[in-house]
Image (cartoon, helix red, strand yellow):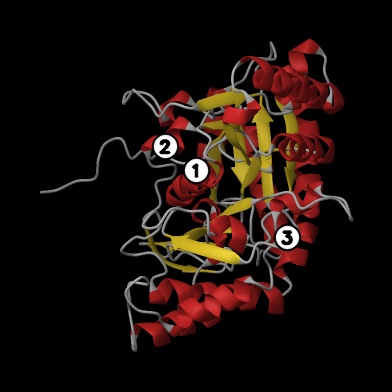
């Protein structure tokens, strides 16, 4: 009898039989409040009726049409619909299936368009598990260990992550100063600008611990990119489509009148409410610099996935889900910070060192009594929450962060329920 790989560690014990909104139901019919959203994928909730209807209708007419062989209407409709939400000037798209594939496509385009070999990535970033994507990932060794040699041409610069520099007494401004100065040093000592194709960065570190960047850091990246002819690749795989309370995560860090931040934008996850589709966007001029035959794939732009994506974008707009993400995110962070304050007061130490994030992308960072990352307690609280019916996930370089990523349809009362369950779980573990 075949079994799943033992390395597929289950975050929760739930065997789901159906889902509705932010709820999953197990084989016994018990409800579970799902604040994982399939790792940020089910943006419109489980089985949104409009998305389900679009997918069902498409299955009955055309399931797949390989898009370098034939065109199909959902592909054309999705491309047109994306033009309404993509950053100005990014008017050409290439579709694939996963975030890793989007990372590889962005890398390939950047190298081919510039004729330069090197990519600068930032400490704590996650871009996927395939060889090139893993080579550009620094959120944890588990994503890149055991199958060396990795791809060459990757150099790593600091991300302005205040939690990593807390022991130095640095705040976000000092962390940003350090990150930009170290980037300049890197371009002077490790990767000559003439050899540097692109900067690749997440607006908010995902697997790296739900750490937002800041406006000055991203303005510094853009200025250096423009000065040296380097491209900026923004990985919006997890932060896109309203997750952070703005349509794109990088929208938080671009002031009005400032230059466009991304030259290449990566997207996936929340675009199709659970159907596998991803892609990159760039200007038509830049995309035309990709070499012939370098873009393609059997399953990219699958007709059912495209139909689901069009429906998802319509639901996001019609139901005001970006705005709901911002409002419910403020409510969630406020509730979690109150829980953290109470827990820290009971413990007499900063056991929950920080509640941070943007929109409905919120992390709780656990530290032990000595201030060191505390993955054991983070996992214990996450598991206790699951026993109480609240499904959550772990992230952070040490596994010290418990993350909340509910569907964008989550209601005020459901956020309150989640905070109450979390409070009980924290109290049970940090008694």
Q: Residues within 10 Å of mark 2 (few under 14, many from 20)?
A: many
**Foreground pick, 235 / 71:** 71
Q: Position of residue 343 (x, y in %)?
A: 74, 30
Mark 1 vs mark 3, CA separation in Å: 30 Å
Tag 3 residue:
325
Tag 1 residue:
107
Residue 172 against residue 355 in the figure, above or below: above
Q: Position of residue 210 (x, y in %)?
A: 65, 39
Residue 104 visible here? yes
**Foreground pick, 187 / 246:** 187
Classify residue 312 by image quadrant.
bottom right
Mark 2 vs mark 3, CA separation in Å: 32 Å
Q: Is residue 174 left or right of residue 156?
A: right
Residue at (68%, 17%) from the top-left corner?
188
Element marked by disc 1 = helix
Tag 2 residue:
132
Q: Pick whichever of labels 1 and 3 is earlier in the sequence.
A: 1
Element marked by disc 3 = helix
């Amino acid at each position: 009898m075949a079994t799943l790989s033992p390395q597929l560690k289950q975050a929760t014990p739930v065997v789901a039989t159906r889902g509705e909104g932010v709820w999953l139901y197990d084989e016994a019919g018990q409800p579970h409040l799902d604040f994982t959203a399939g790792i940020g994928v089910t943006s419109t909730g489980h089985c949104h009726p409009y998305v389900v209807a679009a997918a069902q209708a498409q299955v009955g007419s055309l399931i797949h049409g390989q898009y370098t062989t034939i065109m199909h209407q959902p592909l054309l409709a999705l491309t047109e619909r994306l033009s309404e939400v993509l950053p100005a000037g990014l008017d050409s798209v290439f579709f694939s299936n996963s975030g890793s594939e989007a990372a590889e496509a962005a890398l390939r385009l950047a190298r081919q368009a510039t004729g330069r070999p090197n990519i600068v990535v930032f400490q704590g970033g996650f871009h996927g598990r395939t060889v090139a994507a893993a080579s550009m990932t620094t959120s944890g060794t588990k994503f890149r260990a055991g199958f060396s040699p990795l791809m060459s041409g990757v150099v790593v610069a600091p991300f302005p992550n205040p939690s990593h520099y807390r022991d130095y007494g640095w705040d976000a401004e000092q962390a940003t100063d350090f990150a930009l100065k170290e980037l300049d040093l890197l371009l002077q000592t490790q990767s000559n600008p003439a050899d540097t194709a692109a900067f690749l960065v997440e607006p908010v570190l995902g697997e790296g611990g739900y750490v937002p960047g800041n406006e000055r850091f991203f303005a510094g990246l853009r200025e250096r990119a423009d000065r040296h002819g380097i491209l900026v690749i923004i990985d919006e795989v997890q932060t896109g489509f309203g997750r952070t309370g703005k349509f794109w995560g990088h929208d938080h860090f671009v002031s009005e009148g400032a230059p466009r931040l991304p030259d290449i934008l990566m997207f996936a996850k929340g675009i199709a409410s659970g159907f596998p589709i991803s892609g990159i966007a760039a200007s038509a001029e830049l995309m035309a610099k990709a070499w012939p035959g370098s873009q393609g794939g059997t399953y990219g732009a699958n007709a059912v996935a495209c139909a689901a994506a069009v429906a998802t974008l319509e639901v996001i707009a019609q139901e005001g889900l970006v705005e709901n993400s911002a409002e419910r995110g403020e409510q969630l962070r406020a509730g979690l910070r109150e829980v953290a304050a109470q827990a820290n007061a009971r413990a007499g130490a900063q056991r929950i060192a920080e509640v941070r994030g943007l929109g409905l992308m919120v992390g709780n960072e656990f530290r032990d009594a000595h201030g060191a990352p505390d993955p054991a307690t983070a996992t214990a609280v996450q598991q206790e929450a699951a026993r109480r019916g609240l499904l959550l996930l772990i992230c952070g370089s040490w596994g010290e962060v418990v993350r909340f990523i509910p569907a964008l349809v989550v209601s005020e009362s459901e956020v309150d329920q989640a905070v109450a369950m979390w409070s009980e779980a924290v109290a049970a573990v940090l008694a």
